[in-house]
Image: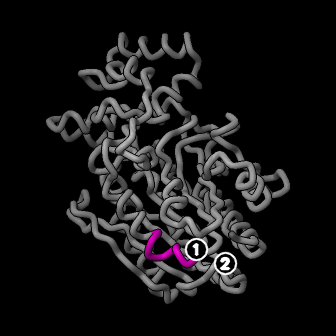
Amino acid sequence: MISPQLAFAANYARARVLFLEGAATAGMAIHSHNHPLTGAQGETLAMDIAVDGAPDAKRLLIVSSACHGVEGFCGSGVQVFATHDAEWRAHAKAAGVTVLYIHALNPHGFSHLRRATHDNVDLNRNFHDFTQPLPENPAYGDLHSALLPDQWPPSEEVEEQIARYIERHGIAAYQAAVSQGQYSHPDGLFFGGHTATWSNLTLRHVLRQHARQARNIAWIDVHTGLGPQGVGERIFACRDDAQALARARAWWGGDGQTPITSIYDGTSTSARLSGLMWCSVYEECPQAEYTGIALEYGTVPLLEVLNALRGDHWLHRHAETPPALSATIRQRVKDAFYIDRDDWRAQVIAQARQALFQSVDGLQHATGT
């Protein structure tokens, strides 16, 4: 086992090296799916897969990172630590559980310090049947011009528009309008796309290749940016299904010590979202009983997170931005999704490790389909 501090990297390129080295040292089977573009340092980008256990196991745990690019600093650290954790790996092996690590679902965003993909899509709003009408979010349209004004930093007048909206409708309504997903403004925040992204298509391929033998699938998808700093909220990540929710609570709820929240009943810090990534399991692995959570670690206050994302999307629209301002905006985004302190990293690892062990215990006693 390594110290939590050594599992986390300062950039995507280093995070990838740490993950691949950890997986290789542990003797895991590794598969890499290269992204068509390069990273911020000209490096190769990839969705890297490591399989720890028998490829034909009936019980499978998926642990994924960087669905939202820059959030990968945290998720990668969790995965790297796990590859070095002999006690954890022995526990999974003894239970007959294979662990499928998916490192950097959105490697382009991870490398370029963006939450969105290379085509400005929020991957966790992108899983739709694009032959059907997409969800509408008129409230976002009302806010778009104020969220992404002509100049950055925004003027006082623009910020007053945002403040008035929050005063009239409340912070929860503002969060929902901005973050639930929108399909009308391709250059805007939380854009869900008009077609499946590279990450969407690649993930589906990975699930078909590595998860179709499983009868029980659990999934922990690591995120950051919502909730109290250092607290890993366990958000129910399945369809709105009472039986799946009961399983999630039995597996990860810790008899109420680590409660499972839900976007469906308003208990989560997240708004109710559309086009969610984990819906892909139902489509690509219909043979399996699926149970999942998003492990969402708090960083900074909600408005700071959203304002950092406003700056990021403004920068995406303004390629002519001077280097100094560009660097400031990018650093603000990283700071919004990753707390560069040892105590925060230690909190992340402790809670993730607990959730990993709970996953295996839950899978071990699952009945399957």
Q: Residue at x 62, y 56 (%)?
A: 343
Magenta segment, which residues? 207-214
Q: Is residue 28 left or right of residue 187?
A: right
Which residue carries the number 1 mark?
82
Q: Give the position of the C terminus as an image quadrant.
A: bottom right
Q: Is residue 369 left or right of residue 323?
A: right
* Quarter location, residue 36: bottom left
* Quarter location, residue 198: bottom left
Amino acid at the residue labelled 1: Ala
Q: Residue at x 39, y 40 (%)?
A: 132
Which residue is more in the foreground, 360 or 43?
Answer: 360
Q: Is residue 10 left or right of residue 351?
A: left
Q: Give the position of the N terminus as an image quadrant.
A: bottom right
* SS for dot 1: helix
> Is 115 included in the stretch rendered in magenta?
no
Rendering coords of residue 274 (x, y %): 50, 40
Rendering coords of residue 46 (x, y %): 32, 67
Rendering coords of residue 74 (x, y %): 51, 57
